[in-house]
Amino acid sequence: MNSYASLCDDFGVSAYVHGKLDMPTGRETVLHFFEAVQKAFPSMTEFDRRPDGEFMLEEDREPGHYRWCSLDARRLCAGYVNPPALEDADAHNERVLEMAPYHLDLHALQTESMDVLYYFDFLYQGNHDEVVADALAGGGPFEGLATIPGGRVLNYQPSLMMALDEGCQLQCRLSVETRTTPYQVKAGNFPESPISVYFTVRQGWAKAPYKTFAESYRNQRRVLDELVDAYVLPHVITPLQRAIAAKQ
């Protein structure tokens, strides 16, 4: 069972391989790769090439949970939105990472880094930046500014990046993305949209201790779980849940 999904409206697990060189774009190579992905996961039937050149294969989004895989100029991506269990996301992401070297000729020499990411979406109809400031600025140096009489918060999207090893090859990043515009604040009209919390563990590939993408993925997922459970949930997710609930 996916315990993280119960904490938010949408939860996702994604993997991103960043290349130093352009990814293959030839028709035959691209189709063979996505056909191999579809063979592994037959319910992935929605294929498209977007205006920016990105290739995308995904499941039907209607049920609210779906696998996806994409290929753009210098990045291979895979993910699972609202997976029934984290193991289901792992099975999908690891299988895509295992196939990539064979179908896309993607190897260590041309790889810059790999990210494994969790995201938590919270639907909220109101001033996103204000509720995030209420949740995360309290007791800190920004609390006074955020509570100026008559003032309204227009932008509050905290971000923090940390090195997790001596060589700065293993890193983590926490970021919060809001979607409220100054015009919406001025008009007092707020459509319902998601506040997103992203937590990423990045492995630099130049001196990576792992031979394969799948091996690194498993380690990065382990680090993600440890840091999310110890720091992100109690200090970011829970306060944000409470602040949103208090305003609804």
Image (spheres, rainbow, N blue to C red):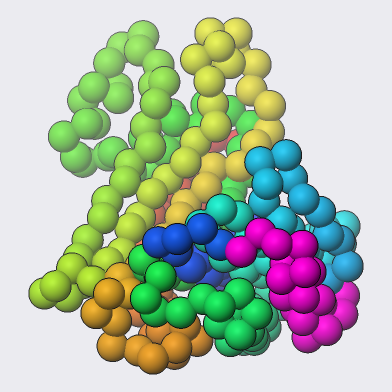
Q: Is residue 33 left or right of residue 90?
A: right
Q: Is residue 10 left or right of residue 17?
A: right
Query: Count the marks: how many?
Result: 0
Q: Quadrant of the C terminus?
A: top right
Given residues 209 and 156, the one toward you in this image is 209
Q: Quadrant of residue 201?
A: bottom left
Residue visible at 50% across and 86% down? 214
Give the residues drawn in magenta, as a range: 24-43
Residue 5, horizontal then vertical, whole percent:
62, 67
The correct choice, above or below, for 179 with respect to 102 in the image is above
Given residues 43 and 21, the one toward you in this image is 21
Q: Predominant secondary structure in magenta?
A: helix
Q: Is residue 245 left or right of residue 149?
A: right
Visible in this render: residue 225?
A: yes
Q: Quadrant of residue 149?
A: top left
Residue 55, horizontal then vertical, whole percent:
71, 56
Given residues 116 and 97, the one toward you in this image is 97
Residue lying at the far left in this picture: please name it. 166
Visible in this render: residue 34?
A: no
Residue 120, horizontal then vertical, whole percent:
54, 57
**26 is within the stretch colored magenta:** yes
Residue visible at 55% across and 32% down? 179
Given residues 131 and 73, the one toward you in this image is 73
Q: Quadrant of the N terminus?
A: bottom right
Residue visible at 43% across and 29% down? 130
The correct choice, above or below, for 129 with respect to 18 in the image is above
The correct choice, above or below, for 154 with respect to 113 in the image is above
**221 is within the stretch colored magenta:** no
